Image: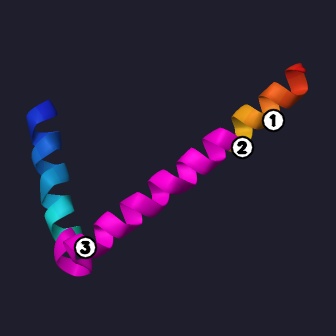
Amino acid sequence: MKDSAIVNLKAEEKQVQNSYGAEEIQVLAKQLTTCYQDLDAYFQGVWVGQEG
């Protein structure tokens, strides 16, 4: 069950790479990571502000 799910994910990943291009996906992944880090830093600041 787990193996087939992994195979399905890899197949989907290939389809996505074929339709978008690996470079674009890497750029999107970097943007998402940056966005997440910004949000994380923001919320940590909010919590620190509320505690203080």
Q: CA distance from mark 1 to mark 3?
A: 35 Å
Looking at the rendering, the stretch of residues picked out in magenta corresponds to: 17-41
Q: CA distance from mark 1 to mark 2?
A: 6 Å
Please tell me whether mark 3 sits on a helix, a strand or a loop: helix
Q: Amino acid at mark 2?
A: Tyr
52 vs 20, left or right, is right
Give the image location of residue 25, x and y in percent: 30, 68
In the rendered image, residue 18 lying in the magenta stretch gets the answer yes
Please tell me whether mark 2 sits on a helix, a strand or a loop: helix
Q: Are marks 1 and 2 in contact (CB under 8 Å)?
A: yes
Q: Which mark is residue 46?
A: 1
| Residue holding disc 3 | 23
Q: Earlier in the sequence, mark 1 or mark 3?
A: 3
Q: Quadrant of the N terminus?
A: top left
| Residue holding disc 2 | 42
Are there few (<14), some (14-19), or many (20+) residues within 10 Å of tag 2?
few
25 vs 44, left or right, is left
Specify the quadrant of the image occupied by residue 44: top right
Give the image location of residue 23, x and y in percent: 25, 73
Near-viewer residue (35 or 21): 35
Identity of the residue drawn at 79% across and 28% down: 47
**Type of secondary structure dominating the magenta stretch:** helix
Q: Is residue 1 visible?
A: no
Residue 2 to residue 40: above or below = above
Q: In the orientation shown, which residue stands out farthest toward the top?
A: 51
Q: Quadrant of the C terminus?
A: top right
Q: Amino acid at mark 1?
A: Val
Specify the quadrant of the image occupied by residue 28: bottom left
Q: Which mark is residue 15?
A: none
